[in-house]
Image (cartoon, rainbow, N blue to C red):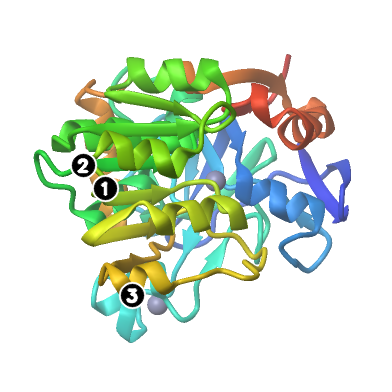
Amino acid sequence: MRKVVLEGPRRLSIVEAPVPEPDIGEVLIQVEATAICGTDRHIYTGGTPVNYPVVQGHEVTGVVREIGAGVNALRVGDSVVVDPNLTCGNCQRCILGKENLCSNIDLMGREVDGVLREYLTVPQNNAFKLPEGASFIESTLIQPLSTVVHAQQLADVKPTESVVVLGAGATGLMHIQICSLAGGHPLIAVGRSQWKLDLALQMGADEAVSAREVDPVAEVLKLTDGQGADVVVEAVGSPKTVQQALEMVKPGGRLIGFGISPEPLPELNLYRMYLVEGRLIFPRATTRAAFHQTVELVASGRLDLAPLITHQLTLDDASEAFRVVEEKQSQVLRAVMTPAG
Ligand SMILES: [Zn+2]
Ligand SMILES: [Zn+2]
């Protein structure tokens, strides 16, 4: 089988390797589709340090082809989506249901080999059965969506609470959809590309603010009677947008730092958060519970995920996929790779 190995920053190669054997409690998955996101981009460019060489990627769907001894939750032939966070299950935080904070957590494609390959093995607990007839390509979005669902559970948007989502990328548009289901109003999307803002409106936003054309802070204050928003979701992670998010929080409101990356945020002024007694929440990854709930949510058919897949390539085009994700951010929501052309 083939796998996509990162040998150093921006150095990918396609390597032949034997198909792995499932260990006790593991399943062997034949990959149907993988997607790459901002986390993969940070690893690819060297912004997130990793031990080279590492197989990239953590968003994947496929079919179970073999099961190891002791596997009872899945069968050969099941379609699955993978939760790529490998957790110990035994530390205090795992026991408390906060596996996302496990002290021994490894993310596939970062601390351990990832999913950009034709076959992979994972513990059965990390493979979630897909609903009947689900698209393998769209279902690669379940993993990032589960991090949005987890973040939204912490944000706890209540009906008629005003919400701003800064950033209209794939996860920003997922936040819009979940906030819309929660009854957030007005629901304001802020972005830079008009076609992404149009999608935000289509996906439930009441207002779309172009950060290219107006000052988004002034515009949000205008749209909220000078108050700011009850909930501000920052889904970009740049110093500028994080500062803008801080300036948009309503007195007593909360800021969800969803776009946080390893990049430092110099000269951030937190004084407004003091003035408004704001709450800062930095959600990390997802929990098993949120992953399960996300699979159910997608099965319910209440979300519009297809428009989030903008690029489709094959595994052999991995270098091109990463180039697109790095250089054409204004044109990309999600780039998906299938094993063969
Ligand atoms: Zn991701
Ligand atoms: Zn643990």
Residue carrying label 2: 162
At 28% from the left and 29% from the top, the residue drawn is 298
Quadrant assignment, res 192: top right
At 44% from the left and 37% from the top, the residue drawn is 172
Q: Where does residue 86 sit, x and y in percent of width and height? A: 49, 64
SS class, disc 3: helix
Closest to the observer, 198 or 144: 198
- Sequence-wise first label, 3 or 2: 2
Residue carrying label 3: 274
Pointer 1: residues within 10 angstroms few (<14), some, or many (20+)?
many
Where is 261 relative to 138, above or below? below
Give the residue type at disc 1. Ala
Q: How far apart are marks 1 and 3 (CA)?
A: 16 Å
Closest to the observer, 102 or 272: 272
Quadrant assignment, res 330: top right
Residue 42 relative to residue 269: left or right: right
At 45% from the left and 23% from the top, the residue drawn is 138
SS class, disc 2: loop
Query: Residues at badges 3 and 2 in contact (C-beta under 8 Å)?
Result: no
Query: Residues at badges 1 and 3 in contact (C-beta under 8 Å)?
Result: no
Q: How far apart are marks 2 and 1 (CA)?
A: 5 Å
